[in-house]
Amino acid sequence: MKSWFIRSALALAIAPVVLHAQSGTAANARPISVDDAIRLAVQNSPTTVIARNAERSSEAAIKFAKAQFLPSLALTYSANNQGGTQFVQGVPVPVSGLPWTYSRGVNTNLTVFDGGTHWYNYKAAGANLDAAVASDVSARYTLALNVKVQYFAILAAREQESAARRSLEEAQQALQVASAKMLAGAATRADSLTAALSVGTAQLAILNAQNLLVIANAALTRLVASPVMVTALASDTSDVGRIDVDEGSLTKMALEGPSVKAAIAAYAASQALHKASTGTYYPSVSANASYGQNPKATQGFLFGGGPTTTSTRFGISAGYTIFNNYSREQTLIAARISEDNAQANLRDAKFAAQQNLTTYLVNYNTALQTIALQQLQIQSATENLRVQTQRYNIGTALQVDVTTAQAALDLARFNLSTARLNARTAKANIEALIGRDLK
């Protein structure tokens, strides 16, 4: 019986070495600050790349809309060779005249009036650019939120592993005491089994924390697109960050956040497109002009001198569509529907911003109160464990009392780590909502 407990104690003593070896992947990860992680993620993430390209596309659309106010310009040059025969009074004769003929010219066209279609398309392009800029900001802060969540998960896993190792040390000490008392006949086998179970539970908690750390490291590495495994910097994790802004100011910031700005811009674009669709109900007026030359064949293909024939043309044309099979009516109805949808989305975006801010603030404040409560709970549980351990050592308490006290301390430590993670996550959610950092 004694040899069995000796073997069990040795097995439990070497287990932490095995657990430490399993965390080798996390130990080899390259530490990175949260700011650097966000910078790399914004640079490499497909979501932010797409958002930046959408902004570039909107800028190009504005240039295109501006160009519609300018006249078009085209240069033409042609060369034709004529040969063969032709019928003259029923008799085929060779084609007479110069075999080569040339022409060159310039043409231009300008829309003078189109019912405001070009103007409102330009306004819509500007609004779409505003929406793209707001979406870019939203994408960057949403990505920053994802990075912070994984970064904070790494910190929480480290806290949990540290707490589990303290629990393991305490459980091993309790096992040594229980084994010694059993060998002396002052304790039962159940006490040793209970103490051994506490050691195993602590070892399992270490393994779980290490697994969470490796998983969070892998997720952070993907977000920053790093060729090597990265992890959070080894720093003090007790600071969860304060929010030194009152709720009224935060509400104003949320209503001016990127999601609301994007909805405002989308509504403005839909209004402009609605007005642009009414331009087809007005007549259109355009002006066009051209100038051409027909040089002699002996001047060559390009711009030779000498006599040429010239032609000039200037004209103004107007047109009005009376009926086009309800095409413009269909376009107008679709534009009105898009405007109504955008208005509803804007209204909902404002309410959603207020709702989310309320939720995040409640979560943050609750997490802060939980942190303070769990810190007191840890102090109380630590003292209770000390008392129960002393009582067990002198024989006035059972090993199950020590194990119960140890479990309460472990739970308080775990809850403290979870509360810190919740506070950090809630603050990061608020920053993503308002589109700015709260240092």
Image: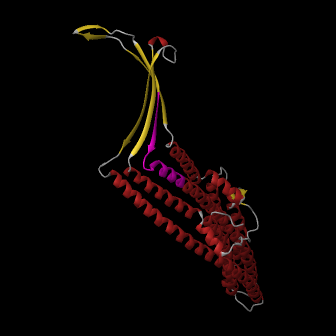
Name the one closer to the observer, 5 or 94: 94
Residue 203 is left or right of residue 393, and the answer is left
Is residue 111 visible in the rendered image? The answer is yes
Residue 399 image position (x, y, % from top left): 69, 85
Q: Which residues are magenta?
A: 106-128
Residue 138 forms part of the magenta stretch:
no
Residue 86 image position (x, y, % from top left): 28, 11
Q: Which residue corresponds to the image point at 69% horizontal and 64% vertical from the top-left?
A: 18
Q: Which residue corresponds to the image point at 44% horizontal and 49% vertical from the top-left?
A: 117
Residue 117 forms part of the magenta stretch:
yes
Is residue 210 visible in the rendered image? The answer is no
Name the one closer to the observer, 238 or 362: 362
Task: Name above or below for residue 51 compared with residue 238.
Answer: above
Residue 375 image position (x, y, % from top left): 72, 80
Residue 110 is left or right of residue 413, and the answer is left
Residue 256 image position (x, y, % from top left): 60, 65
Name the one closer to the observer, 100 or 373: 100
